[in-house]
Image (tube, grey):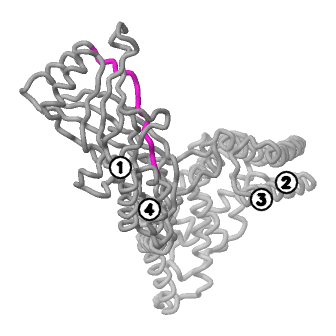
Amino acid sequence: VDWTTLGWVMLAFLQWTNIVVDRILYLRRLIWAKALMQIVTVLFFFAIFFCNMMEPLLVEPSPSFYSILYLLKCWYWVASAVQIRRGYPAVTRENYFFKDFSYTSSYLYIVYSVIPFLMDMRGMLDWTCTPTTLDFYQWMKLEAIYAMLFQRQVTLQYRETLGRKVGQAQLYIMKTLTGLLYFVGLAIVIWAPLLVSVVSSKYSSPQMIPVLGVQLDVALSTGMGDRFELSSLTAVSQSLLHVPSACPPSAFDNVTNWLPPTQSYLASKALSDQCEVKDSFSTFVMTSEGSMWAPTPVRRMQLQRAVQGNSTAIYLLLQATYVRNVSGIPQASAGQKEYQARVLGETKSVALSDVQRKALAQVLVSGKGRVVVPAVLDPIVQLSADSATPLRYGMESWRQSVSLVLNKQADDAPDSNMWWSVCCEANSSYCRRSSASSEEGACGALWVLAAVDPGSVNVLSRLGLSLITIYTIFVLAIGRSVRSICTGDVPLTIYNELPAIDKLWALCSDIYTARHHGDLDLEEELFTFLVDIYRSPETLLQLTGQGAVGSEGPGG
């Protein structure tokens, strides 16, 4: 699912709103509003699921996603109907996880507490919808104390079940199992992301990463580094060719058959000799004209002086930029967003000879004419992840000659109505004539055949993650959590190692009971008493008892 699509974002927001409103109705025990919301949500989501099948308003996900989402909503409607039938419980503000002191409830509460913002949003809703004398800070402090007492009671009951006496060594089987589980868990956290990335990259089938388009920037530069932009040409993919594993020369006939026979054979033979299994090849034919050429009078005069003078060299620059779909996954529909990246090709720099400089100077003065620069652009390029390399590097006979033609709308037209046509010189061996005209001197289109290396898309890249992200965020976060669990929070030792919590637990329960019955004076008085207890270590010691940790049960 493309979650950047507005429809899906709105649907997710409405589902989140539904959860918030449901919690508010539960706290206020408004059963009639719950029944009304049940009817509204059933009609709304049925309209979304079934009407969208006839006329899709959202990006089409896989059918399994619709099925899972629909089943989850049906389960919610059934549970909600049972709740409406039986009514809300008398007490709606207790914590479900604190009903029994088992390790299952403890682990479930830990999972609930680590979900970002879930506990905070629930605390804010409960505080907003409940009559209380406590402010939000005091409310959350009471919730934290209650949770700490719950976790401590779970630990005390577990130690009582083990029955270890004072001075008795820890059981060997428990130490072995605990150490083994911790060690295996840490090993998985440290090495699993790396192993998953390497194995999935090695054994996954290569994915075609097609080229979506090519941009060719044409400019003139001086030996002093001054640059004069002439035109920017673009092209989209004309054809995509998947080559068989044997790489026969005949597989490239469709992309080279428009060349002269000799050049077509040489190109097909070279591609067949150097191609790799499952390479994908795309041909691109450039537009001859780009935008209007409208330099300022000062810049045009600077270019004329540089070309006419002999103090500095003049270079023709051609820079190709290839746009690729780095996700490696074809589009599911026309509305799906492309994940693109630009691969900057090699910049071609050719020094103009004296004859070419004189021709260029005459073109600039007259406002029209042609300049031919031989052996400039490599027609066949091998693309890797972040670079572009010519297939026959250094062989000038394979390069296309470039013809720069300055056009003017009319002889008496102003200089702003001028543009450059960047063509393939007809005398070049690897030149493609324009289909619109075949006369001598016609503007042939520049072309590029891009051979794309296949890439293996591993599991992490499909999820939009990288190894650096995994190890920087998740592994380090888990490492800090493990360190906190193993060493404990030393400043909280006086609260985390209480020998018994019965009296404190009863005091917290009395605060919730007083709030439930509307006795707000008693609620505030009991909360103040609880805070005074935690401020006084002597009082805390008297209420919780004194004994060896692990030798007694929760009652002290």
Query: x, y (%) of residue 536?
Result: 48, 56
Which marked residue is nearer to the observer: mark 3 or mark 1? 1
Give the residue at x 46% y 54%: 257
Please tell me the numbered disc located at residue 379: 1
Q: Is residue 130 visible?
A: no
* Distance in Å between CA atoms under marks 3 and 1: 49 Å
Query: x, y (%) of residue 510?
Result: 70, 55
Secondary structure mostly seen in magenta is: loop
Q: Which residue is mark 3?
A: 67
- Read off the magenta span: 283-296
Q: Is residue 123 visible?
A: yes
Q: Please say if 363 is above or below 453.
A: above
Q: Nearer the viewer, residue 351 or 328?
A: 351
Q: Is residue 418 magenta?
A: no
Give the residue at x 26% y 34%: 372
Q: Earlier in the sequence, mark 1 or mark 4?
A: 1
Amino acid residing under circle 2: Trp
Please tell me the numbered disc located at residue 470: 4
Please tell me the numbered disc located at residue 77: 2
Q: Residues within 10 Å of mark 2 (few under 14, many from 20)?
A: some
Q: Please say if 452 is above or below 441.
A: below
User: Which image quadrant for residue 153?
Assistant: bottom right
Q: Nearer the viewer, residue 59 or 151?
A: 59
Element at badge 4?
helix
Element at badge 1?
loop
Q: Nearer the viewer, residue 412 or 57?
A: 412
Element at badge 2?
helix
Q: Residues within 10 Å of mark 3 (few under 14, many from 20)?
A: few
* Distance in Å between CA atoms under marks 1 and 2: 62 Å
